[in-house]
Structure formats: structure tokens, C-alpha cells
Amino acid sequence: MATLEGRHEEALRDFVWFHMHALEHDKALSGVRLSFGLGYWKELADLYAPARDALDETRSRAEGLLLSGQGGRFEFNEVVAIDRELDQPANTHSLFARIAVEKPEVARQCADLALEAVAEVGDFELASRFLPHPESYLLWLSEGLNSSIARTKGLAPALLSRRRAAYVRNYCSDVRTVIKVLNELGNEDAAGAALDWAVALVESRKARTMVSRELLGS
């Protein structure tokens, strides 16, 4: 509301506070913090230069912690989310490539978060070094989707539909990245098997239909 009413300084204070302190009050806001929260902040940044400066500073702080050895998966996830909002996958790739050399253990912990950006810029050599085992990774992704879908039981139909659509969209995005990497590495058979398995692993019939439609067009 403050953004729409032109109260940009107030809106920026609210977005920064939410980003820095939301998890102190409710851990369940983790996803919202790095999706809707950053999305609204980016909208303000397009109108108000100090908001963009603050967003860049937030990313720089997380990157600094990672490179100094004080940060890990939490900070890298923050960097990835900000780079995604700013449409800067090359920045995620550059940071991950550096971490892969300087902090290989941290790179292994964050590889799944970096994979989309690494594939998007076409560095499939780096992707191949850190790509989790496809079957294990798809099993982990599907368990996350199935768990998230299960938690929507009892929600109002409209809210359930929105959340299910968001969970499916994120899942399919991750699956497409795996398939893209496998294809680029010349593992077409593995890519085809991964595609079929990604659909079969979804427990909810409704969600499975949605996944099949997104991934297979059927």
C-alpha cells in the first residue's frame, strides 16, 4: 500500500524489516520472504533508487559472508533469490564458480540452489561436477513437493489451488533444469527416464496431472 501511495521511504523500511526479521517471528515465512517479499521490494526498486541500493547491499552482505567462510546455504539461497528477481543468473553463476574453487564444501551444500543459474548461462562443465545424482535428486524434490501438497489439506479451495500451483511450478522448474543438464551432457536416455520418473513420483493425482501437463504437455 505504501508503494502504491508513493510513500517509498516507508515502504522500503517495511521491506527491509520484513527481510531481516520475519523469520524471528515465524520460520514458516521463509518462502514468502524470498519470493513475494523480494518481488514487492523489486517493484519498489524499479521506482525508487534507494530501494535498489538497499537490495544490492543485502545481496553484497550475503555474498561477503559466503566468501569469508561465515555463510552457508542460508546466505547462498538469499543471493540466488535476489539474483532471480533482478534477472541476473550470471551473477549467481560467477559467485558459485568462485565458491567451487575457494569453498568446495559450501559449494556442495549449495549446488542444487545454483544449478538453474549455472545451466542458464551454459556452464555445463561446472553443472556436471556438482549435479546431484539425478535419481536421488528427483526423489528429494518429489518428497518436498509431496510434503508441501499434504500440508495444504484443509485450506480454503482458492488458497489451496494457488499454493498447489506454486509448488508444482517450482518443482517443474527444478526438474527441467535437471533434464536440460542431462541432455547437454549427452545423457538423453537418462533425461527421458528422469522426465517419466518426475511425473510418477508425485503422489497427489491432481498435482501429478498438473506436473504431467507442464513437463509432457499431456
Image (cartoon, grey):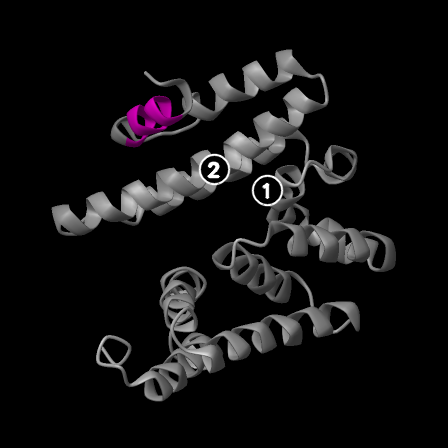
Which residue is at a point 14% across and 48% down the rendered structure image? 158
Q: Position of residue 99 (x, y in %)?
A: 79, 57
Looking at the image, the residue that sits furthest to the top is 189
**CA–CA distance between discs 2 and 1?**
8 Å
Question: In the image shown, does 57 or 6 lie closer to the viewer?
Answer: 6
- Amino acid type of disc 2? Ser
SS class, disc 1:
helix
Return the disc, 2 or 1, that comes first in the chain's sequence.
1
Depicted 162 relative to depicted 6: above or below: above
Which residue is at a point 47% across and 25% down the rendered structure image? 198
Which residue is at a point 55% across and 14% down the rendered structure image? 192
Q: Which residues are magenta?
A: 207-214
- Res 40 → quadrant: bottom left
Q: Position of residue 12 (x, y in %)?
A: 39, 82
Magenta stretch, main secondary structure class: helix
Q: Position of residue 22 (x, y in %)?
A: 41, 77
Question: In the image shown, does 187 or 136 lie closer to the viewer?
Answer: 187
Which residue lies under the disc numbered 2? 173
| Residue 209 falls inside the magenta stretch | yes
Which quadrant is the C terminus positioned in? top left
Left or right of residue 112, residue 82 in this image: left
Which residue lies under the disc numbered 1? 116
| Residue 52 falls inside the magenta stretch | no
- Res 15 → quadrant: bottom left
The answer to the question of whether label 2 and label 1 lie on touching residues, with beta carbons closer than 8 A, is: yes
Left or right of residue 170, residue 161 in this image: left
Looking at the image, the residue that sits furthest to the right is 101
Which quadrant is the N terminus positioned in? bottom left
